[in-house]
Amino acid sequence: MAALSPRLSGPIALIANPAAQNGRGAWTAVEAASRLSARVGDQGFYLLLTERPGHATELAAELPPETAAVIALGGDGLVNEVACGLMKRGRADRPPLAVIPAGSGNDYAATLGMAASLPRAIDQILEFRTGPADIGQVNDRYFVETLSFGLDAAIALDTVERRVRTGGAGTRLYLEAAIDQLFHHLSTYRFRAAIQRETPKPAPRESGADGASGPSVVEGEAYLFAVQIGPTYGGHFRIAPQAVIDDGLLDLCWATPHLGPWKALAVLLAAKGGHHTGNSHIHLAQAPALVLDFSDEPPAQVDGEKIEGTHFEISCIPDALTVIRGR
Ligand SMILES: [Mg+2]
């Protein structure tokens, strides 16, 4: 449901990571603050700069109740931190979340339809078109866009490492990491997924004797297993092209053997545009929740950050956030 509200009920909080994009985040924050000041006045917003990892979560959790909206100015990692802070508040006390893309990975900003240009993104935010958004939970962590295991997580984490090392960015960096992983580290991970059925039918009688309410179990080997709130990861790879953020469902995508490096690369390149879904090695599902177990610990990431473990209890929390959408 969209609402158009040109008048803000209180100040906007702008949370920015000055260290983002190899230090360019500070300049982007200053430019955003200057443009916001011109639009809503100095009393209409305030700037909060993060000082350490996790700080944005604390800042978002402690925003005053009259806050009209909170803007995460940064990449997916910062958005994740801000969302985690909002989740520490009661549902009615979570101000709308907006995103100005200013990070290395801006998948969530794209999911919200935010413009890459700073002035245009500020226009979009001040148009204040709000809507509900689900959030994903994996064990004790939240994710706004993506949770993935195996090859794609290895690529995402390798991309982050390369970015720090080389200062590079974008799809090219992702592809460099992908090619290295595909040709030198391609492996499969044995998994068991107990996938909760999408719409448990209300039992006509008391007994669940037909077993229809139980999860469907998938076991096997996979190169990757992605669990998505939004459609993309890794810099706009459309791994789950049908995913929408407000249907109460996680979109799952996993890839099964046997693919050699070249075939796997072809599938990955097709996934850039979301054209991989017809491949017989690609499996798609939607579910409100699943339990995912791996025999050996796979590379794993939530919104671009590394996580560890072999047992993952994953669920979609419907309508957890209000977000400002670009279009
Ligand atoms: Mg969904």
Image: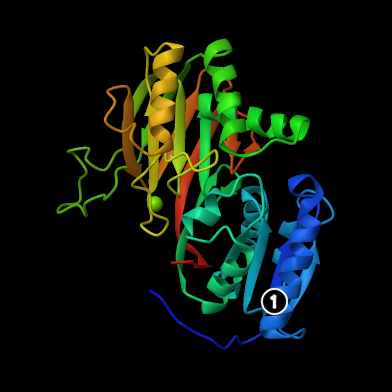
Viewed as shown, does residue 292 lie left or right of 171?
left
Estimate the x, y position of residue 144 in percent, counting from the top left. Answer: 54, 52
Question: Residue drawn 22% across and 43% down?
Answer: 208
Question: Residue drawn 48% across and 66% down?
Answer: 326
Q: Is residue 168 visible?
A: yes
Question: Residue drawn 40% across and 33% down?
Answer: 271
The color scheme shown is rainbow
> Where 121 sits versus 5, above or below?
above
> Where 68 sits versus 96, above or below?
below
In the rendered image, the quadrant that contains the C terminus is bottom left
Nearer the observer, 23 or 146: 23
Estimate the x, y position of residue 81 in percent, counting from the top left. Answer: 67, 54
> Circle 1 sits in a helix, a strand or a loop, which is it?
helix
Viewed as shown, does residue 225 lie left or right of 17?
left
Residue at which label 1 appears: 36
Label 1 sits on what residue type? Leu
Estimate the x, y position of residue 154 in percent, counting from the top left. Answer: 59, 26
